[in-house]
Amino acid sequence: MERKAVALLSGGLDSTLAVKIMLELGVEVVALNFITPFCCCTRRDAGCKHQASQVAQEFKIPIKVLFKGREYLEVVRHPRYGYGKNLNPCIDCRIFMHRAAGEYMGEVGASFLVTGEVLGQRPKSQRMDALHVIDRDSGLKGRVLRPLSAQLLPPTLPEIEGLVDREKLLAMSGRSRKPQIGLADAYGITDYPCPAGGCLLTDKGFAQRLRDLFDHSVDLPDLSEVRLLKVGRHFRLSPTSKVVVGRNQEENEKLSRMARENHYSFKVLGHSGPLTLALGPLTEEDLIRVARITARYSSAPSDEVVSVDFRHSSSGHEGHLCVRGIEEGELEALRL
C-alpha cells in the first residue's frame, strides 16, 4: 500500500484532528470536502467549505471540494438504512461520501481513507455495527482509518502493513468533546467553527418541511426548492401549492433572489412587511388567502384593511387585493 491517504475534511474539530494526526505520523494527505444544501455551520460568513479550505491551507495539503447534489437528494429521499431522529440518513450519507472518496483515492494514488469519526459519538452512524456496514457497502472494508478511535476498532490494512503506527493512534469514544478539545489545545488548534457538525436534516422543523416537499413531489424536487426550505415561514395551501413568507429584511432579499418564473410574489402597500412567495397554481381563493397571510405579518393593525400587490413572474398576472390579516387559527392549520 502507498503511504498516502485521502482524508474527509469537513472543517470541524474531529476531521481537523484526524488530518493533523496523520501528518504527524508522516502520511501524505489529500483532503476531500463535501458540501450539501443541508449545511448549517455556525459561522454564516464562512461555512464548512471555507473552513475546510483554511485548514488545508494551514496544513499545506491539497483539497478537492465536491457538491452532493441531486444524486444525494435521492439518497435522502430513499435511504436504505433509514433515518436518525429526524430526516438524517446518516449511514447512507457516509456510504455515499466514502464511495466518492474511494473513486478519488484511485485518481490521486491514495491507498486508504481517513475520517474524523469517533466511536459512539453519533447514535445512528458511529456505532460499531454501523461503521462495519459503511466500510462494507462503500467498498472500502479494511481501508478506512479512524485515528481518533482506532485503538477501539479492528486494525485496518494501513496499520497491519505498518504504514501507520497503531500505538500512536487514539481510543476516544462517546459524545463528550473534552478529549478532542484537549487535543486541539495541545496542537494549538483554536479555530473550529463546527465542532459538533451542522446538518439541517437533523433539525425537526427543516425535516418537516423537506418531508412535506417529498410528499408533494412526484419526481425528485429541484435543488432550488430544497434551498428555499431554509428561508422564511412555510405554509401548505394545497397538494400543489405552498407559501413562503420572509421573516426580516435579509430573508426578504433572499426570497427576491430565489424567486423563479413560476412564482407569485406578494407585498403589502403602505406598511412594512414581508415579501411572500407562492409556489404552484393559485385559485382566486388562494390569492386572497396568500394576501391575508402577507398582511398578517406586516406592521398593519390586525383589524385594518390593507392593499396587497401580487404578481406572477412568468405570466405577468398581477393586481392588488384589499384584505385583513388572516386569523391565527386558520394560519396555524396551514403552517409547516
Image (spheres, helix red, strand yellow):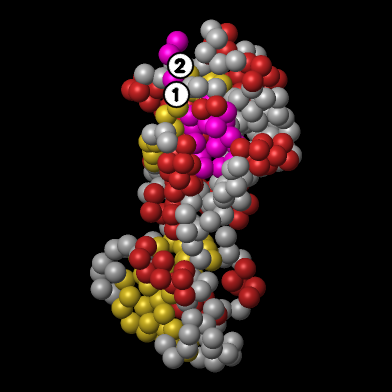
Residue 297 visible in the picture: yes
Whether residue 282 sits left or right of residue 7 in the image: it is: left
Q: Which mark, by number, is residue 243?
A: none
The foreground one among 171 and 27 is 27
Point out the stretch of residues depicted in magenta. Answer: 1-22
The residue that disc 2 covers is: 3
Mark 2: few, some, or many residues within 10 Å (few <14, many ≥20)? some
Q: Is residue 259 magenta?
A: no
Query: In this view of the protein, which residue sits in the foreground, 217 or 261?
Result: 261
Q: Is residue 86 above or below residue 64?
A: below
Which residue is drawn at the image coordinates 66% and 42% (left, top)?
185
On the rendered image, what quadrant is the N terminus found in? Answer: top left
Q: Given the image, on which type of amino acid does mark 2 rest? A: Arg
Residue wearing tag 1 = 28
Q: Is residue 250 left or right of residue 149?
A: left
Which residue lies at the image location 58% right of the left edge and 90% below the top edge? 301
Q: Secondary structure at mark 2?
A: loop
Residue closest to the eye, 222 or 150: 150
Q: Mark 1–mark 2 contact, CB under 8 Å? A: yes
> Can residue 90 be seen in this snapshot?
no
In the rendering, at what x and y percent does residue 213 appear? 48, 51
Where's residue 240, x and y in %?
Answer: 43, 57
Query: Is 175 displayed left or right of 193 in the figure?
Result: right
What residue is at 72 percent from the left and 36 percent from the top? 179
User: Residue 224 or 188: which is nearer the viewer?
Assistant: 188
Q: Is residue 13 magenta?
A: yes
Residue 246 against residue 64 in the figure, above or below = below
CA–CA distance between discs 1 and 2? Answer: 6 Å
Residue 37 location, x and y as percent?
Answer: 45, 48
Type of the residue with mark 1: Glu
Q: For the C terminus, which image quadrant?
A: bottom right
Figure quadrant of residue 90:
top right
